[in-house]
Amino acid sequence: MRDSQMPQPVGVVIERLRKEFGEKVALNDVDLTIEPGSFVVLLGPSGSGKTTLLRCVAGIERPSRGVITINDVCVAGPRTFVQPEKRQTAMVFQDYALWPHLTVRKNVAFPLASSTRLKEQKNQRVDDLLERVGIAHLASRYPNELSGGEQQRVALARALAADVGLILFDEPLSNLDADRREQLRIEIATLTREAGATAIYITHDQSEAFALADRVGVLNHGSLVQFDTPENIYRHPTNAFVTRFTGVAGECPVVAVKSSDDDHFDVWLPFAPSHPFPALGVNCREGDSSLHFFVRASGVLLNAPGGDKGVCAEVIDVAFNGRGYEHVVKVDDQMTLTKVFSNRRFERNANVKVSFDPSFCFVMAVPGRLS
């Protein structure tokens, strides 16, 4: 149940945001509207601009140009720059950023120092948060006595204690091992949504982004290239970069394409020049020599070599992942497919048949090639 004293979640509007560091353009006219109460994840590789964008919203960086509005109040613009401590935001950092001389309890209580709550209410708020994030038994310890996961729980509790409607997460799980990362991801999602806060969270991990987000913003070279639900980004990527960065089993050049309807094409591939494969076309046209065929791992079906279904392939590697088996498969020396899942184990060097689900196949132009 949401605390009655917690502020309402806030909306964020970013207009033509640009940030330059000398000659380097870190953000290139980014437009983004974040609805109150939503959990938005900014996804992109190192150098894509996602950290700079978050730091501009927080007030740590001053934009070179553009406008940022939080809860209908301009915090950055041509003649306006509101300092970070006056923006009513909380931030969870990658390196935790805890006060080393304060105990866990005092770290969590720190944002409540200026609160109008009564002392008893402040103490109860801290107790509740320590219990919720599973560190009540560590209340009297100092940060250097905690593990990385425990320190990040303190940082999360501190952010939630701040009584703000916007929480910013700067890759908070990147320093944790896989088990702790998964557990804390669930806690971040649950507690942030229960608090009713708006969240902006940055990561370079596609699976983390899809698991957390209501909407995902994909950045590349300082530009926001797609902003949509995780499902739409996975099923309807806007270009080759988004497709690759959000996970493909494989790709290969296209021999030829022919339009089958407004959105789909019949695609001829080098390893099966007489057999067309249906795929969703993304800004492509017949006769374009820069086209590539992409397939998601979830769109690759692995079958025994008998029968007519699929094309011939060879298993290069196989790994057990707990649910079943992930295979690396080579198709006629033309395309290598990775993370091909099957409940059945196909041994290395085994001959198999591979078929593709058209729902997870795309054909689109690859930048840098002439058409």
Image (cartoon, rainbow, N blue to C red):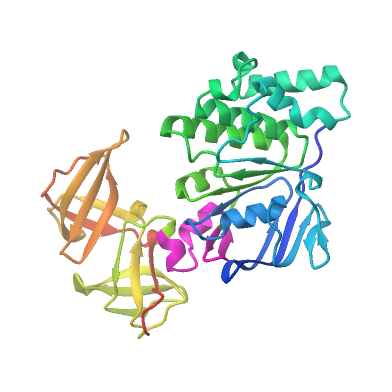
Q: Is residue 152 above or below residue 230?
A: above
Locate residue 229 relative to residue 277 in the image: left or right.
Answer: right
**In the figure, residue 163 lies in which quadrant?**
top right
Magenta stretch containing residue 321, yes or no?
Answer: no
Locate residue 320 relative to residue 45 in the image: left or right.
Answer: left
Quadrant occupied by the C terminus: bottom left
Q: Position of residue 300 (x, y in %)?
A: 30, 55
| Residue in view at x 80 percent, y 68 percent | 78
Instruction: State the extent of the magenta-drawn residues as a range.
Output: 218-244
Residue 4 in sight here: no
Q: Position of residue 17 (x, y in %)?
A: 68, 66
**In the figure, residue 16 lies in which quadrant?**
bottom right
| Residue in view at x 73 percent, y 30 percent | 161
Q: Position of residue 290 (x, y in %)?
A: 35, 79
**In the figure, residue 22 lies in which quadrant?**
bottom right
Q: Is residue 20 above or below residue 90?
A: below
Q: Is residue 58 above or below residue 270?
A: above
Residue 338 in sight here: yes
Give the number of marks.
0
Locate residue 233 relative to residue 347 in the image: left or right.
Answer: right
| Residue in view at x 50 percent, y 67 percent | 238
Taking depth in this image into account, of 86 and 355 the one nearest to the observer is 86
Q: Position of residue 131 (x, y in %)?
A: 65, 19
Quadrant occupied by the N terminus: top right
